[in-house]
Image: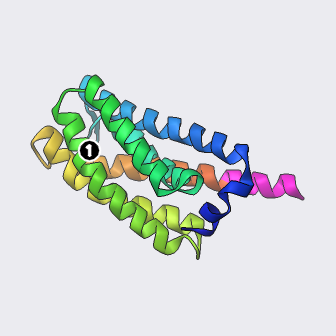
Amino acid sequence: MTGLARSRPEAGHGLVWSGLAVSAAYVGSVVMANWASTHWSALLVGSLIVPAGTLWAGVTLTLRDLLHEALGTAGVLAAIAVGAWLSWSLASPQIPVASVVAFAVSETFDSLVYGRIRDRSRLGAVVGSNVAGLVSDSVLFVPLAFGSFAAVPGQLLGKTAATTLTVAALLLAKVARRAVSR
């Protein structure tokens, strides 16, 4: 267990509530990614095909890291299961199947990379794990969901944009916390 996970009982209800909030955001992002991929048309960015759920899926990568911090591996696995179950009921069958397969592999890579880098740099762990997750997820999800690799470059672009935005938000939050604590 991580140092944060070991200290969780002393942290009190605040950590549990923040964990539940991050869990809800994570599940919501997974469901939105799959729902959008089913119900919305892909976007064209230049010559790149970007599946509609790509940005939502990219946000899940960072939310997974935050969920890992708040609730540990068991919380992440529970949130993945809930997200997959809800996606199954809201999206066409090939989307949740592709999502579950791709997320199972990418979340494993994401979690392994995050765990190895986290003690040196949490921000570095988020960036490194997001890169591992977005590449593995895109290479698996796109052909399973859409029957072609054509949208993989667009998926990579969209998830990279989402990762950049979420990492920027984390940096701003870190700066704001430091300013408030001074």
Question: Which residue is the extreme one toward the left?
Answer: 147
Looking at the rendered structure, the number of numbered marks drawn on it comes to 1
Secondary structure mostly seen in the magenta stretch: helix
Reading the image, the residue beneath label 1 is 100
* 119 displayed left or right of 160: right
Q: Give the range drawn in magenta.
A: 172-182
What residue type is disc 1 on? Val
Question: Which residue is the extreme one toward the right?
Answer: 182
Q: Which residue is drawn at 71% across and 43% down?
A: 13
Q: Which residue is drawn at 58% across and 66% down?
A: 122
* 160 displayed left or right of 147: right
Looking at this view, is 95 or 165 the one in front? 95
Vertically, is 118 above or below 99? below
Quadrant in the picture for the C terminus: bottom right
SS for dot 1:
helix
Q: Does residue 174 show up magenta in the picture?
A: yes
Crowding around mark 1 (Cα neighbors within 10 Å: few <14, some 14 to 19, many 20+) is many
Q: Does residue 115 show up magenta in the picture?
A: no
Q: Residue at x 27, y 57 (%)?
A: 105
